[in-house]
Amino acid sequence: MPSIYDAIKSDHDAHRDLLNTLEQTSGDTPERREAWDSFYRDVKSHAAAEEETFYSKLISETWGQDSARHSVHEHQQLDDLMEELNEMDMSSPGWLTKFKTLKHDYEHHIDEEENEVFTRARETIGEEHNEAFGQRFEERKKEERGLIEEKREDSLED
């Protein structure tokens, strides 16, 4: 089982790849739609799992409260941007403009997590717990992915 840091970083690397793929596509093509769907579902489940397993632990420490709140706030802002993009025509210039904002903001967020939050988190989550937190993160992400799929199926039936 990967450590919590390896699990989160692995997701971030996959998200960076999907962001680059999306940036290199154009219009409402199957390639863009598939990359967007993968990015959307994975980031949503990643953020929920991260908040419930990683940030919930960090918030227990005084130093971690501001950091966790800041990151959770960024999650909400990114979620809002993703929902706006979901409602837009992928072939419109406005979609690409908003996507570039999302890409910039998300890359800033994950760089901040990996370079600042991880360093401080290691003081709170002892090395002996890294794999247990990684396992909880992966399990929670899988549960969240299932909830996202259920919600998606329900909206398709309406």
Image: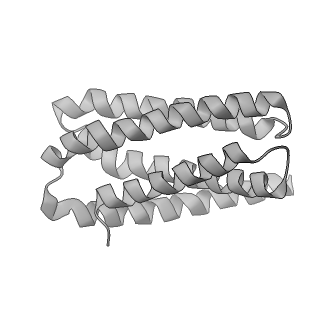
Which residue lies at the image location 68% right of the left edge and 37% below the top edge?
83
Say left or right for 22 vs 109.
right
Q: Compared with residue 82, is residue 138 higher up or lower down, i.e. above or below?
A: below
Which residue lies at the image location 85% right of the left edge and 33% below the top edge?
92
Q: Compared with residue 72, is residue 155 higher up or lower down, i.e. above or below?
A: below
Say left or right for 149 vs 77.
right
- Figure quadrant of residue 135: bottom left
Say left or right for 113 vs 81.
left
Q: How many marks?
A: 0
Q: Compared with residue 121, is residue 129 higher up or lower down, i.e. above or below?
A: below
Q: Nearer the viewer, residue 138 or 38?
A: 38
Question: Can you see residue 80?
Answer: no
> For the N terminus, which image quadrant?
bottom left
Residue 146 picture location, percent across and down: 59, 63
Residue 2 picture location, percent across and down: 32, 68
- The colour mode here is one colour
Q: Nearer the viewer, residue 112 or 57?
A: 112
Question: Can you see residue 39?
Answer: yes
Which residue lies at the image location 60% right of the left edge and 58% below the top edge?
147
Q: Nearer the viewer, residue 150 or 65?
A: 65
- Figure quadrant of residue 126: bottom left
Residue 109 picture location, percent across and down: 44, 35
Q: Residue furthest bottom?
A: 1
Q: Nearer the viewer, residue 89 or 22?
A: 22
Residue 125 picture location, percent across and down: 18, 51
